[in-house]
Image (cartoon, grey):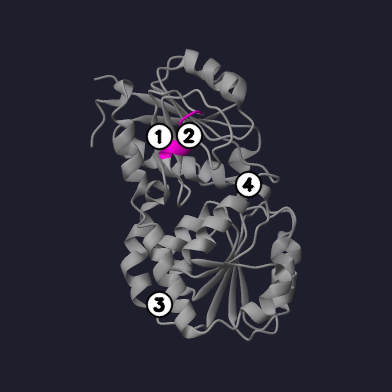
Amino acid sequence: MVTPTICFRADASAATGTGHVMRCLTLADEMSRRGAECLFVSAAGTRELVPSLPYPVLPPERLPFGTALAVIDHYGIDAAEEARIRSMTRAVMVMDDLPTRRHHCDLLLDQTFGRRAEEYRDLAPHNSIVLAGSEYALLRPQFAAARPAALARRDGSLRRLLVSLGGTDPGNATGAVLDAVAASGLAVDVVMGAKAPHLEAVQAQAAALPHATVHVGIPDMAGLMAAADLAIGAGGTSTWERCCLGLPTLMLVIADNQRDVARLVAESGAARPVTVADLPAALAVPPAELRAMSAAAARLCDGLGAARVADALRRLPPLKGLAP
């Protein structure tokens, strides 16, 4: 059997963050484990922002011809461009987060909690496969592995706070959050990417606090989330990581495309929507509410979504020969 090649079309930048590339990387690792050869087609600067990317990276103008599958995770690529890419490959998968755009694809993934396949009925080809809902969230295996121990320690106590607002955080919401929680007395772990434009300012700010640590390019995000009692996070891809580990969240919206996710997760009871101004009062979460938020979060995502997506991809003719 000829090894099928899968190319992932996703970019990382200071403005858009690293989330699109990171969820593609999770799927690439799963498909590679099953026998596919993976590569990325990404804009300049992507590898610098995601140094853990272990696959070849080609510039967008060198999208390879004849690959078994192209995976597109990019808000700037429309249905016409998807159709052009489809003419060069044997199948196309598209990732999206809102049912507002038309797509030309063989398989579509929207990993948002509460999303239904029917919402894409008029937006994707009638014969395409649509995977909708947070059971398909693309999480690295370390999160499912850490889940049992993380859930077992969720007793409603609040000692440790995790602040994670995206790999780049171009608006420096992290700095505003640190100001808001400075008097809380909690231990605070802050996560940022090495290329975040405000990293040095946040590091200086954290150094002035008694129990704050800034983690840069951390390899074990699951361990850090499992050790936290409450998170201050945004509505990006890390939402599902927090849910898998039952981590209650005070959720900020720092980009328009996060509003729908934030609303749906808050309605489930897994998170409380807040503004930065709300934070000092919002940190006084009663133990019973923390336990309830944790249980609600854990129901949204079990960490096994990558395997479910890979199983669905094996239904596409070019990938039928891959290992289960």
Whole-number angstrom distance, CA of label 3 to CA of label 4: 30 Å
Which mark is on residue 120? Answer: 2
Please state which amino acid type lies under the numbered disc 4. Answer: Asn
- Foreground: disc 3 or disc 4: 4
**Camera-side residue of 277 and 46:** 277
- The answer to which of marks 4 and 1 sits earlier in the sequence is 1
Q: Residues within 10 Å of mark 2 (few under 14, many from 20)?
A: many
Image position of 157 with respect to 15: above or below: below
Look at the numbered disc 2 and give the secondary structure of its residue.
helix
- For label 3, the residue is 154
Q: Residue at x 52, y 51 (%)?
A: 237
Q: Nearer the viewer, mark 2 or mark 4?
A: 2
Mark 4 and mark 1: Cα distance apart in space: 20 Å
Q: Secondary structure at mark 4?
A: helix
Residue situated in front as seen by the camera: 274 or 240: 274
Q: Which residue is mark 4?
A: 257
Instruction: Please give the label number shown on residue 130.
Output: 1
Tell me which segment is drawn in magenta. Answer: 117-122
Tag 1–tag 2 contact (CB < 8 Å): yes
- Calculate the distance from the C-alpha at mark 2 to the C-alpha at mark 4: 17 Å
